[in-house]
Amino acid sequence: MINAAVKEMHTDLAFHEGLLENLFNAVMFSTRNRQITFWNKAAEELTGYTRAQMLGKSCCEETLLHFDKDGSEVCSGWYLAAQTLEDVLIREAEVYVRHRQGFLIPVRVRVAPVMDRSGSIAGVVEILDQTSAPSSEPQAAVQPAYIDALTGLATRKYLEMRLHSRHEELNRFGWSFGVIRCGVDGYAKILRQWGPSLADRMTVAAGKTLANCLRSFDVVGVWEPGEFLAIVPVLSAGDLYAVAERVRGLLKGCCVQAPQGAISCEVSVGAAVADVRDDAEKVVFRATIMMNKSRKSGGDKVSL
């Protein structure tokens, strides 16, 4: 139904607005000069930006940046839309968009041309669907002691319990896993300069981005203020490094607004693959050493 409506759409959007407004999919229309002229309720819910905030804005502005799976910004040249304006083809891709609160959301974006009554291209319509839910494990832990009140992620107590169970599975069945520990670079400075409210917002943005970029069977939670830990099933150190690098890149895409402008979330990341000769505490210890190594070398880096 969505594709049919998109293909047949003309610049007389008033005819279609009733249909598009009530779709579960987030929908936006942009003219050839990149001005947003339509923004439905689902787009408001997905991004946190209201219609009033977005109508008339340019879709190239920082509020609508798209990021690839590695955290690289892909809006240069207006990304898929620019190509569709050139050849009038429908395109789709899986990307991340940034919510108003600063965290990244995984979406599938479909871009299609919108033709005017003369058959000339008038702009493009973008349809966005969230592609995956965050890891459900912390939410499934019904005991309040296992859920961090600020982020909704797992607490350190829950992470420690899962680390021990994962290590038992490694010893009994050979199911390998790794640990990723990451800390927000300059967190103490943010806390000191801007206060706990902004530091909390940075923690929430980073935590939600982490939950959105990891798989449903990965476990992620708050280890210390401004620091997170993830337990990730992997087959090799190379696999773990790839996950850790994706985490670093995507976290760099989230940000929070401070009085003097946006503050990006750069992190120092350390990772370690569990070994049967270790206990759970030693795996975390090795990941912590690697995180500190990244931090001492300037931050915004992965060490394994």
Image: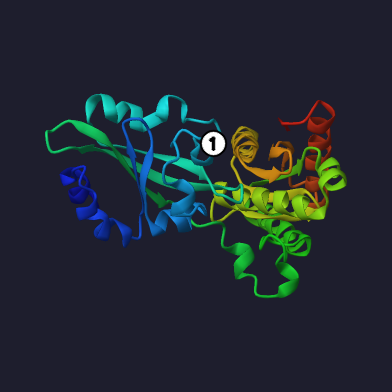
Question: At which x and y percent is residue 237?
Answer: 65, 35
Q: Quadrant of residue 197?
A: bottom right
Of residue 190 and residue 71, the one placed in the foreground of this image is 190
Q: What residue is drawn where x is 50% and y is 57%?
A: 133
Residue 191 to residue 75: above or below = below
Question: At which x and y percent is residue 70?
Answer: 55, 34
Q: What residue is drawn where x is 63% and y is 38%?
A: 240
Going by the image, does 60 lie left or right of 264?
left
- Mark 1 residue type: Glu
Mark yes or no: residue 193 visible. yes
Mark yes or no: residue 264 visible. no
Going by the image, does 104 lie left or right of 190?
left
Of residue 195 and residue 134, the one placed in the foreground of this image is 195
Of residue 61 and residue 152, the one placed in the foreground of this image is 61
User: How is the protein colored in the picture?
Assistant: rainbow
Q: Quadrant of residue 143?
A: bottom right
Q: What residue is drawn where x is 46% and y is 30%?
A: 75
Quarter holding the N terminus is bottom left
Going by the image, does 289 lie left or right of 121?
right
Indicate the secondary structure of the residue bearing disc 1. helix
Quarter holding the C terminus is top right
Outermost residue toward the bottom in this view:
143
Question: At which x and y percent is residue 186?
Answer: 81, 38
The image shows a total of numbered marks equal to 1
Question: At which x and y percent is residue 86?
Answer: 26, 24
Identify the residue position indicated by label 1 in the image.
62
